[in-house]
Amino acid sequence: VQLQACGRGLVQTGSSRKLSCEASDQSISTYSVAWFRQAPGSEREFVAAIGWDGHNKYYRDSVKERFSISSNVAENTVTLQMNNLKPEDTAVYYCGMDERPNRIWARNPTISSFKNWGQGTQVTVSS
């Protein structure tokens, strides 16, 4: 599977940004997709995920009221809408596809669930 993430940019605090992750070879209607991010000197951390059914959604607490994840099966694309961005959101954002089909998590997924990653897209939020 190939995952193409886009939406990189330099934005100001309080602004919005949309990231997109387009998958090829495997369908998002079968495999759940997540966004992780990695800031310099930090480990990759979970941001949001959407289940293969398009209904189950997961968010880390710090973005729950600001970010929204959605999917478009026809375009095989998962989108992360980020609003009210803060400097601490600055990171390289990666989309990942679950290695197992038709899995729904009971809680936020961990990085171990993902073996397929996109190339990452940089989001920088200036204060």
Image (spheres, rainbow, N blue to C red):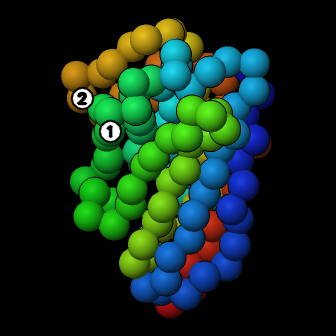
Question: What residue is pinned by disc 2?
Answer: 107
Question: Residue 61's x, y, as percent?
Answer: 25, 54
> Which quadrant of the structure image shows residue 39?
bottom right
The reply to whether residue 87 is in sight is no
Question: What residue is pinned by disc 1?
Answer: 57
> Which quadrant of the structure image shows residue 6?
bottom right
The reply to whether residue 102 is in sight is yes
Residue beneath the point at 39% across and 24% down: 53
Disc 1 residue type? Lys
What's the CA distance linking mark 1 and mark 2? 10 Å
- Which image quarter holds the N terminus? top right
> Which quadrant of the structure image shows residue 125?
bottom right
Looking at the rendered structure, the secondary structure element under dot 2 is loop
Residue beneath the point at 57% across and 64% down: 18
First-in-chain label (1 vs 2): 1
Identify which residue, 37 or 42, lies in the foreground: 37
Residue 58 vertical placement versus 82 (above, below): above
Looking at the rendered structure, the secondary structure element under dot 1 is strand
Residue 123 vertical placement versus 96 (above, below): below
Residue beneath the point at 50% across and 9% down: 100
Disc 2 residue type? Arg
- Compared across the picture, whether 22 is left or right of 36 comes to right
Question: Residue 70's x, y, as percent?
Answer: 45, 46
Residue beneath the point at 46% across and 66% down: 82
